[in-house]
Image (spheres, rainbow, N blue to C red):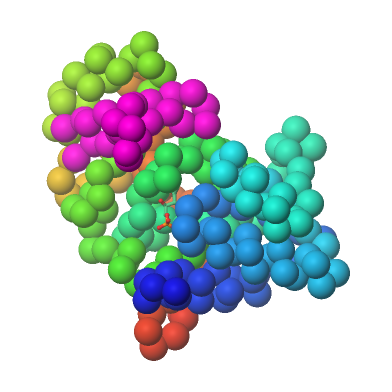
Amino acid sequence: MADVDRLKALAAERALEFISNGMVVGLGTGSTAKHLIRLLGERVRGGFRVLGVPTSIATEKMAREAGIPLTTLAEHAELDLVIDGADEVDPARNLLKGGGGALVREKIVAAAARSRVIIVDETKLVDVLGRRFALPVEVIPFAVPTATAAIARLGGRAELRLTSGSGNAFVSDNGNPILDCRFGDITDPARLERDVTLIPGVVDCGLFVGFDPIVVVAAHSGTRIIR
Ligand code: 5RP
């Protein structure tokens, strides 16, 4: 396992302590969440009872393979907990997410959960959001040109996300493209989230503000909890 992947696995393992028997748990998307699903699957096979709500088709497939029983928001509109990764976490525990393109379902599940646990390796902790990572914005196909122009008016540079390899436009699980938007330092994430999501045709963006997550950080020296 590569070094950073080992840290992701450590964070996922530590997060298991937040899951109690019988909980309905949102299952995040990405390479860190993948470890959580694997480890939770092992627990389920050992008799642990849990119901998962996947935040993406990829996670749904992985969870099924791991033997985790699944449910839907139609059956459980309120969840006990969600555990998910993030691309950046700032000192106020605001998040930038969506590197894996699952931001819309991830935010819906985060909002439906009574508590949220974010699992990251220490490289994800940043002083300010947006310096390293572009902000993913999911838009309906019809709105790509107008949303691109609106993002420019907000001071951002939008680039249509392409699927690595084929060069075709990336399509989310919801059938939409994603604009990766460079705004430079995002000093007021709440304001930018509001401004971007007010653009007609924008479904949502990868800023997760005010969710008050518990953050599990894995470093070479061990794991720590920030809350
Ligand atoms: C997917 C996400 C992921 O949580 C985020 O991209 C982190 O991914 P990884 O754990 O692979 O670093 O927001 O939409």
- Pinpoint residue 18: horizontal percent, then vertical percent: 65, 69
Front residue of 181/164: it is: 164
Image quarter of the N terminus: bottom left
Rendered view: 78 above or below 8 = above
Rendered view: 150 above or below 83 = above
Front residue of 22/64: it is: 64
Residue 217 visible in image? no
Left or right of 104? Residue 13 is right
- Pinpoint residue 132: horizontal percent, then vertical percent: 21, 54
Residue at the image point whose x is 27% and y is 63% from the top: 126
Left or right of 77? Residue 149 is left
Q: Which residues are magenta?
A: 157-182
Residue most extreme to the bottom:
221
Left or right of 153? Residue 224 is right
Q: Is residue 208 magenta?
A: no
Residue at the image point whose x is 78% and y is 51% from the top: 69
- Pinpoint residue 224: horizontal percent, then vertical percent: 46, 80
Residue at the image point whose x is 39% and y is 60% from the top: 93
Quarter residue 204 falls in: top left
Quarter residue 78 falls in: top right
Residue most extreme to the right:
47
Residue 25 visible in image? yes
Q: Is residue 172 magenta?
A: yes
Residue at the image point whose x is 57% and y is 44% from the top: 58
* Secondary structure that dominates the magenta span: loop
